[in-house]
Image (spheres, rainbow, N blue to C red):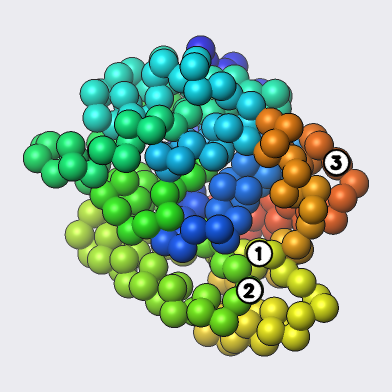
Amino acid sequence: MEITPLTTQVSRAKIIAIANQKGGVGKTTTAINLATAMAACGKSVLIVDIDPQGNASTSLGIDRAIRTTSSYEVIIDGAPIADAIFPTIVPGMGIITSSRDLAAAEIELIDMPRREYRLKEALEGIAHDYDYVLIDCPPSLSLLTVNAFAAANAVMVPLQCEFLALEGLSHLVRTIDRVRQNFNPTLEIQGIVLTMFDRRNNLCDLVAADVRGHFGAKVYETVIPRNVKVSEAPSHGKPVLLYDMRCAGSQAYIHLASEVLRRESVLAA
């Protein structure tokens, strides 16, 4: 099933890999809610779920029983990418779902020709159909993540405000550098978004200041707060913006989308 874009596209989609090798940092939450906010701004958006856990697909209410053509079939079997696109409850937003079979993809990819470019070559088929493609990566620096980095124009890093955040981020930066040198010379860090921010916790402020001190303008001004509505929304199969538009989490993702789109417009100028 293919989504009809909101607008006639003449340019290629901006492809952003949303990645962090650490789990539980708000990566999938950021992918689905940033995509929803972008769609609300009139952009046509596609989410590509390449995490074997399939949380992005589940959070958007896509039942596993109907995921007959998933990112696994696209990457491993070379299935037509248009056959893998599902509509969502968000107008202008589609998703390529995940599959548990992706857990074995690491082994299957090892002996495949051009194994790092399988996703990049698949996405060529829809490059002009969307404004943005957001790739929800697995919480590891694996061949699936390398595929996402080889396909992407940029990487967005959700970073939980905790003590060991910078140490994990340094590993990710080194991986991005290696991918840039070997597979994708134009890859860059698009931005770092601070997640699960609790203003009552002094450690959050210290970590935020440390990250901003290291990465400067790469860190978005918008921070995503800890918010119970954000945690509840996936169990209802909805982005938080549809579950509770007025909650602090929804407003934060709206502001993040605006900041991302402003940054993109400056880069395009």
Residue closest to the eye, 104 or 123? 104
Residue closest to the eye, 198 or 180? 198
Contact? badges 1 and 2 (CB < 8 Å):
yes
Q: Quadrant of the C terminus?
A: bottom right
Which residue is painted at 49% across and 58% down in the image? 23
Position of 28 with respect to 199 (left or right) is left
Q: Amino acid at mark 3?
A: Asp
Which residue is painted at 38% across and 33% down in the image? 100
Q: Quadrant of residue 5?
A: top right
Q: Residues within 10 Å of mark 1 (few under 14, many from 20)?
A: many
- Residue 56 in sight in this render: yes
- CA gap between label 3 and label 1 equals 18 Å
Q: Which residue is mark 2?
A: 161
Position of 252 with respect to 266 (left or right) is right
Measuring from the top left, give residue 260's x and y in whole percent: 64, 55
Q: Which of the two discs, 3 and 2, labels the residue nearer the N terminus?
A: 2
- CA gap between label 1 and label 2 equals 6 Å
Q: Which residue is mark 3?
A: 244
